[in-house]
């Protein structure tokens, strides 16, 4: 891969653009494929990842049988990181998906109907946007107890306003185009125009926004877990591992570093995937 | 001899080739322009004329590259040429004047400052005193007949014609030896077009510079160019003195282009068309690029590409078949003895319609009538209110005052149906949903239209998507295509098919042919004529182009400043206009 990048940099600009994109895309897909595998099958590969074994606590990296060492409770860092993929990555997926569905529905409605509908929806959106996510997370946890699913729901509610705004502005841009006016003249129903004509043309916007939201949600959920608001204590989760590692930072720094690196790598891969898909779209699209 | 030739030939280009990832887009183009003369480059979209201009000014977009050489003001550049070389040449040697004065000027800077930028760039390292720059700016504004106050104004405060004058002043401030004007008047209304063109021609003589005028409009080029170069799909097909090439064309394409330009003084039974479509840039073909659309094509044309060879009277022609001027078959002229039949019911009657946008009136008490089976034209310049009127009739805007009667019943927001009025829009690229196949779009329109007719006395004509496609002259297989796979003309046909799906009582064509190439425009005008005859269609045709309206409309309304200034039968209004404004519009058509 290194060689590939080097030759492409040396090649003329036009070639470099053509050749570099697939490399980024493929790298991202490999990383996300591994993450997905870990999320789906991690608990099968390491069924005992969360089992406490005080006798083997705080082993340094490179110990026999524990390549990345163990944490304070004697859990293997590699095993728990693989097992933690599910709780770290699935919640944000639901957050991004939920925010997309909510955002698309209300964004389409606000942008297409305009007038009073738009006014009411936009003010509610403004209100939600003013809420500090992390603080709200702590408050909700205080009221209902720290729960993974409450956190997920909370993040959907706080992420959706961004989606509403983006979809709404996309709709407003499309609505004046002749193809939408032609659909109006044919007296097609508003729902049909919104969901058959407008939605397909908003897809590039939706997809990009979904991926960006996903990366942000991974970080937000990890942050909440780090604060002890997300997942229960003892659950395999990258955010949770960060705080657990704090206790053993000097005996085995990898307890914290491993999940931190994983969060950064996966979030970056998702962001770069969004980028790569966008530039392919821009190149491939006709007039 | 050699020296004398060099002195006369201020600008020359040799073996110019522009290539992109898909192949050659401009092939083997050579020309020379003596000082003080103008070269016209004529061609439809995809002919490579704009890329030629960009190659000669070193402004090709990334991904394209040029070979060949250019000599301007005694400096030779072997293309593509280094950035430093072009930096020295652009300005004092060559300047490019762009089509759209709405985007080519910075909206956030005063016009005077934008002219001053050129002056400072010309002065290079020596600093000009502020007063000196001011004086020169005023001088350049005066040259383009603009008042000195324009210097303090922003482009947004000026009309299109004034903006293009500012752009010309800025271009000429560099005192270039070669001015390239790429469609300099296309974005302007007819009266402004004429003024800007006259201005350019005058300044060119005054400054003794060479000029290249690029246009799709034969009439425009005929008026200003000494030499002309006709391009088709990246190749030069005919080149020589303007009077000869455009007066008695030898190449079938030039002849076709000339014939498909609609005349304003008579109505033709059918316009002469060049069948088929312009190939996409970079599309690979064998033999003559024009063979597929050529009426004269022989077997040899499909095998090899004809070279550009000299024919009599100093012109070059690339054709195996045609050796002399092509005599046109004069198309049948329609005998227009038609009169408006006042006993027929009006499909749409507009009474005292008034509409304002943010306090600025767009329509002032407009009244028009369109009777069953009529084709009525509305002609006006941009900003005259013609599109607003069309949108009010279609129900896309709501009028402030006045009534729109559909067969005697006032139209409100609640009694409109799809089968009353349909619109064919101007831009075929945005009129179709890019993510919907042609067949799906048509089927959907058919379902909507049938629902609209239900319960009324008129039984809907049951059509299918493939019947609609056939009606507009497209093969049924097009139903599976996406709009991106169609050419501009094909898209406009699909848009027409879609608007016909609900069998509307009135079809509004809002500048429906003005975004199309001349050869395609003629095809669409003929199609509308055929549809009118076959279906008894009632058409409201909105246009800025009198010649086009002459071909399609029986009656005409001239609109200006939101008011109908003159109306009547098209032939009478155009032959004996009663109002000064109408006379002004007619005289501005450069023919």
Image (cartoon, coloured by chain):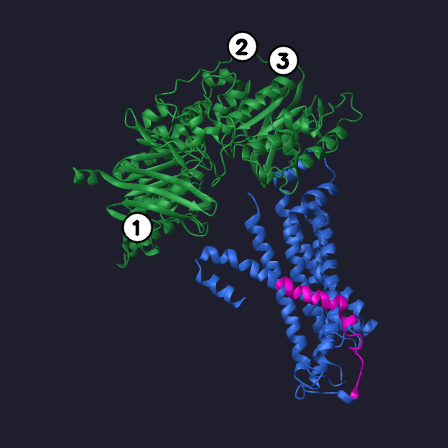
Chain colours: A blue, B green
Q: On what subunit does the disc labeled 2 rest?
A: B
Q: On what subunit does the disc labeled 1 rest?
A: B
- Residue B255 located left or right of residue B440: left
- Going 71% across and 82% down the picture, which residue do you hit? A66
Q: Is residue A184 above or below residue A166?
A: above
Q: Is residue A167 above or below residue A152?
A: above
First reached walking from the N terminus: tag 2 or tag 3: 2
- Residue B321 located left or right of residue B469: left
**Circle 1 sits in a helix, a strand or a loop, which is it?**
helix
Q: CA distance from mark 2 to mark 3?
A: 15 Å
As for residue B355 lying within the magenta part, the answer is: no
Q: Main secondary structure of the magenta part?
A: helix
Residue B225 visible? The answer is no
- Could you say where residue B413 lies in the image, as x and y percent from the top left? 72, 34
- The span shown in magenta is A28-54
Specify few, some or many for label 1: CA neighbours under 10 Å numbering under 14, 14-19, or 20 or more.
many
Q: Which residue is mark 3?
A: B342
- Going 38% across and 41% down the picture, which residue do you hit? B52
First reached walking from the N terminus: tag 2 or tag 1: 1
- Residue B425 located left or right of residue B151: right
Q: Which residue is mark 1?
A: B89
Of circles 2 and 3, which is in front?
2
Q: Nearer the viewer, residue B26 or B163?
A: B26
**Circle 2 sits in a helix, a strand or a loop, which is it?**
loop
Q: CA distance from mark 2 to mark 1?
A: 60 Å
- Could you say where residue B269 lies in the image, as x and y percent from the top left? 52, 16
Which disc is residue B267 wearing?
Answer: none
Q: Which residue is mark 2?
A: B337
Specify few, some or many for label 2: CA neighbours under 10 Å numbering under 14, 14-19, or 20 or more.
few
**Circle 3 sits in a helix, a strand or a loop, which is it?**
loop
């Amino acid at each position: 891969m290194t060689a590939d990048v080097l030759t492409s940099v040396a090649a003329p600009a036009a070639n470099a653009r053509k050749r570099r994109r697939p490399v980024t895309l493929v790298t991202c897909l490999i990383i996300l494929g591994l993450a997905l595998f870990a999320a789906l099958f991690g608990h099968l590969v390491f069924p005992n990842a969360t089992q406490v074994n005080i006798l083997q606590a705080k082993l340094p990296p490179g110990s026999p049988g524990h390549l990345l060492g163990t944490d304070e409770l004697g859990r293997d860092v590699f095993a728990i990181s693989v097992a933690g993929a599910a709780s770290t990555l699935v919640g944000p997926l639901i957050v991004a998906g939920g925010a997309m569905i909510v955002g698309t529905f209300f964004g389409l409605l606000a942008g297409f109907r305009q007038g009073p509908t738009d006014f009411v929806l936009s003010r509610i959106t403004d209100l939600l946007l003013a809420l500090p996510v992390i603080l709200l997370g702590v408050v909700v946890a205080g009221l209902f107890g720290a729960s993974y699913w409450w956190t997920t729901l909370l993040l959907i509610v706080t992420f959706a306003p961004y989606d509403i705004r983006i979809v709404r502005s996309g709709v407003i841009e499309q609505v004046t185009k002749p193809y939408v006016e032609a659909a109006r003249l044919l007296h097609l129903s508003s729902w049909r125009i919104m969901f058959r004509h407008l939605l397909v043309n908003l897809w590039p916007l939706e997809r990009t926004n979904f991926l960006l939201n996903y990366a942000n949600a991974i970080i937000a959920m990890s942050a909440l877990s780090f604060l002890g608001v997300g997942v229960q204590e003892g659950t395999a989760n990258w955010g949770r591992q960060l705080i657990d590692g704090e206790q053993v930072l000097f005996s085995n720094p990898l307890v914290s570093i491993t999940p931190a690196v994983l969060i950064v790598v996966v979030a970056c891969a998702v962001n770069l995937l969004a980028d790569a898909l966008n530039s392919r779209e821009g190149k491939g699209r006709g007039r | 001899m050699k020296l004398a030739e060099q002195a006369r030939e201020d600008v020359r280009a040799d073996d110019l080739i522009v290539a992109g990832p898909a192949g050659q887009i401009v092939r083997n183009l050579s020309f020379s322009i003596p000082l003080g003369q103008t070269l016209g480059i004529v061609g439809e979209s995809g002919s490579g004329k704009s890329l030629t201009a960009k190659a000669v000014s070193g402004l090709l977009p990334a991904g394209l590259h040029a070979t060949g050489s250019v000599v301007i003001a005694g400096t030779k550049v072997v293309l593509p040429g280094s950035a430093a070389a072009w930096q020295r040449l652009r300005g004092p040697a060559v300047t490019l004047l762009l089509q759209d004065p709405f985007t080519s000027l910075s909206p956030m800077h005063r016009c005077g400052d934008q002219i001053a930028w050129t002056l400072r760039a010309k002065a290079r390292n020596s600093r000009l005193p502020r007063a000196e720059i001011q004086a020169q700016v005023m001088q350049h504004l005066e040259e383009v007949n603009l008042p000195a106050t324009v210097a303090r104004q922003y482009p947004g405060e000026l009309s299109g014609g004034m903006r293009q004058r500012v752009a010309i002043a800025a271009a000429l401030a560099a005192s270039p030896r070669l001015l390239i004007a790429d469609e300099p008047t296309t974005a302007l209304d007819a009266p402004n077009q004429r003024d800007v063109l006259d201005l350019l021609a005058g300044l060119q003589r005054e400054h003794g510079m060479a000029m290249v005028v690029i246009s799709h409009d034969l009439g425009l080029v005929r008026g200003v160019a000494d030499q002309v170069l006709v391009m088709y799909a990246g190749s030069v097909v005919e080149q020589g003195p303007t009077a000869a090439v455009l007066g008695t064309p030898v190449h079938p394409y030039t002849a076709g282009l000339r014939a498909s330009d609609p005349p304003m003084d008579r109505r033709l039974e059918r316009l002469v068309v060049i069948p088929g479509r312009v190939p996409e840039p970079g599309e690979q073909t064998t033999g003559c690029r024009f063979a597929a659309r050529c009426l004269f094509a022989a077997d040899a044309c499909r095998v090899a590409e004809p070279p550009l060879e000299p024919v009599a009277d100093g012109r070059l022609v690339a054709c195996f078949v045609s050796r002399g001027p092509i005599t046109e078959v004069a198309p049948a002229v329609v005998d227009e003895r038609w009169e408006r039949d006042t006993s027929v019911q009006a499909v749409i009657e507009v009474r005292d319609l008034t509409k304002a946008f943010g306090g600025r009136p767009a329509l002032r008490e407009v009244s028009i009538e369109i009777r069953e089976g009529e084709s009525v034209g509305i002609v006006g310049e941009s900003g005259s209110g013609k599109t607003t009127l069309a949108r009010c009739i279609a129900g896309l805007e709501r009028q402030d005052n006045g009534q729109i009667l559909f067969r005697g019943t006032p139209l409100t927001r609640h009694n409109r149906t799809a089968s009353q009025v349909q619109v064919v829009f101007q831009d075929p690229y945005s009129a179709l949903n890019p993510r919907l196949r042609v067949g799906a779009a048509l089927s959907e329109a058919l379902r909507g239209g049938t629902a609209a007719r239900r319960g009324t006395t008129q039984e809907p004509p049951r059509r299918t998507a493939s019947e609609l496609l056939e009606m507009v002259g497209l093969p049924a297989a097009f139903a599976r295509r996406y709009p991106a796979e169609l050419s501009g003309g094909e898209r406009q046909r699909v848009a027409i098919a879609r608007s016909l799906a609900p069998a509307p009582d009135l079809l509004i064509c809002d500048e429906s042919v003005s975004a199309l190439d001349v050869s395609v425009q003629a095809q669409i005008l003929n199609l509308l004529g055929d549809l009118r005859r076959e279906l008894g269609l009632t058409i409201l045709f909105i246009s800025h182009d009198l010649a086009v309206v002459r071909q399609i409309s029986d009656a005409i309304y001239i609109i200006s400043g939101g008011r109908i200034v003159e109306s009547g039968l098209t032939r009478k209004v155009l032959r004996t206009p009663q109002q000064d404004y109408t006379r002004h519009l007619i005289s501005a058509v450069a023919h």
